Amino acid sequence: MNALALGWRNLVRQRRRTVLMGIVVAFGFAAFALAGGFIAQSFAGLREGTIRTVGQLQVVDRRAVAAAEETTLEFGIRDAGRARSIIASDPAVASVLPRIDFVGLASTGAKSVPFLGVGVDPEPEAAATGARELVVAGSYVAGDGGDGVLLGTGLAAALRVRPGDRVTLMATTPDGSLNAVDAIVQGLVDVRFKELNDRYVAAGTTLVSRLLQSEGTVSKLVVFLKKDAGEEAAAKRLASALAGAGFPVVVRHWRDLAVFYEQVKLLYVGIFGFVGTVLVVVVILSAAIVMTMSVTERTREIGTLRALGTRPSGILRMFLAEGIVMAALGCAAGAVFALLVRAGLNAWGFTLPPPPGGTHGDPIHVQVYPLAYGAGLAVMLATMAIASWFPARRAARLSIVEALSHI
Amino acid sequence: MPTALLEAHDLVRTYRLGAAVVPAIRGVSVTVGPGEFVALQGPSGSGKTTLLNLLGLLDLPDSGTLRVDGRDAGGLSENERADLRRDRYGFVFQTFNLIPVLSSEENVEYPMALGGRPAAERRARSRELLAAVGLAGKEGVRPDLLSGGQRQRVAIARALANRPAVVFADEPTANLDSHTAEDILDLMRALCESNGVAFLFATHDPRVVSRARRVIALHDGLIEADTVVA
């Protein structure tokens, strides 16, 4: 009869209490498993979203890392076509997207509104980032984009234009002169952030280069890697290949560019860390009460076991084993519960509220993250061991004579 | 005379009850040899249980010495005392004190498991002991399904599991009807004679006293008389 088997029998004997305590542990475990899964899913979603916007790697001019441009394309990459083909020839690279950042005024003649523009290569951009899915009215810009532009919904509302209408884009060229081009509103997009929707303009690089009179120069090259390609290794290879070809550029990792990602991650870790701590404390306290009751009720039994020659450490082990068997049972029940809740939530199709500053929430889709279940098990085992420790130690230290005469 | 099993010299034990100091044992010297069948007799509060607890290494004296098998028990650690109880002592309690979650057989096996005996040996020994106390066929039964007399028989079998030198029994018949009590006493006496195990009872049951071969009478924490009965 080992300690675990004895622990199990004592738990069965105190059935009602075991069930109640098991429910506490099960809820604790399920909370960890589900919240852990939810956090992991949120981080994965956030990561994916971030990468969609900034790419996995970004190639920028060396000067752009430390300082902001004073004029458009001040730190642009010249001869971008050559750089692009060098990058594209790396075996790990799936696609390279040119981006031109620019600012200006969009005008319908009656009204002018400042915008934040981005010049893209429309087809590869859509393929890599899913940009086409952001279109809520009209259509995406085809081919090299031609004269077509995409406007953020807020900007379109401010200008009172609809797909098919004409707008004039005005901007300052790198050499400081003012230029304008006529464009056709091809579609309206919701980029999921209200502030950006009110200012967003996207167009093909051909049109933007004509506006800025900057043929062949881009602000940056956004790189997407093939699945499972090593980001760090690819970054190193690209940096040396480009440096070898005479480009004064650096390769940046998406994590360095995504301040938002790190901030949200920190926020989530903070919130869930706090809630998790409260949860652990509650489970520890209730388990400690249950174990203390158990020790008190079995005082005479403890005295008997001690009289028969059980060492104090043996008594300690017996109660610890009970706590651990309880934790294991509770976690098993909690895992079943968590899987049921997960199935229910996913079937319900509930949509989460949008993240801070966002316009769209994602539908909840809780995945099974084995790591979260493993963490739940580890936390509950540790919790029950801590909760059992003090009552068990009290039991081990009882005076035998007093324990035997306990009523 | 063979080596004394238990040799107590001038044991003193006082308890504190609130502000009052209660002297339970006030200087008791006693020697118990192997195979003795001894009754500690006396009225309530005379110190029988206290003396039994001290000799049984369940409690520590305030002063005085105790030698077990010629070895000074005063210098033993908690674990050493536990090991000594496990290997050399058996205990029978007034309220039987079986482990409720274990079957009769497992209760008897428990002290042997503590001593690290192999499972097969434990099983064989517990069956043999349960048969010896008249409980063959009750091996798998849990204590709550046994009568008082049957429980005490299991407790006796458990006390003998590790082939102890001495069995301590505090009022072993107090919770039994008179017929059962006599059966239990006859059983213990028979086991004492067949196994050479010493039995030490604290009791005020005249039936126990009448079966003892030696009666130590306690009064107010002192030995009043120590009589060897033929």
Image (spheres, coloured by chain):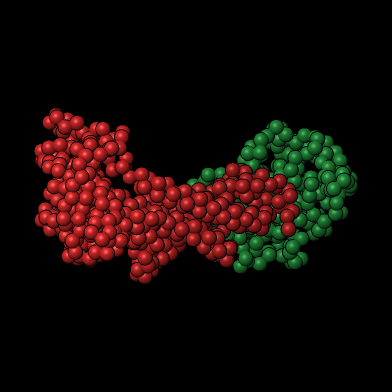
Chain colours: A red, B green
Q: Residue at 24%, 62% (x, y): give it.
A: A188
The one of B168 and A171 positioned closer to us in this rendering: A171
Position of A393 relative to A65 (above/below): below
Disc tally is 0
State left or right for residue A226 relative to residue B162: left
Q: Residue at 73%, 55% (x, y): give it.
A: A406
Residue A125 showing in the rendered view: no
Q: Position of residue A384 (x, y in %)?
A: 53, 51
Q: Which quadrant of the figure contains the N terminus of chain B?
A: top right
Q: Position of residue A275 (x, y in %)?
A: 50, 53
Position of A130 relative to B220 (above/below): below
Q: Quadrant of residue A220?
A: top left
Q: Quadrant of residue B131?
A: bottom right
Q: Residue at 65%, 63% (x, y): give it.
A: B150
The one of A209 and A360 positioned closer to us in this rendering: A209
Residue A203 showing in the rendered view: yes
Position of A300 relative to A165 (above/below): above
Q: Position of residue B225 (x, y in %)?
A: 88, 45
The one of A136 and A195 positioned closer to us in this rendering: A195
Given the current orientation, which residue lies at the most extreme front position?
Answer: A110
Position of A355 relative to B216 (above/below): below
Q: Quadrant of residue A255?
A: top left
Q: Position of residue A314 (x, y in %)?
A: 58, 45
Q: Residue at 85%, 48% (x, y): give it.
A: B18
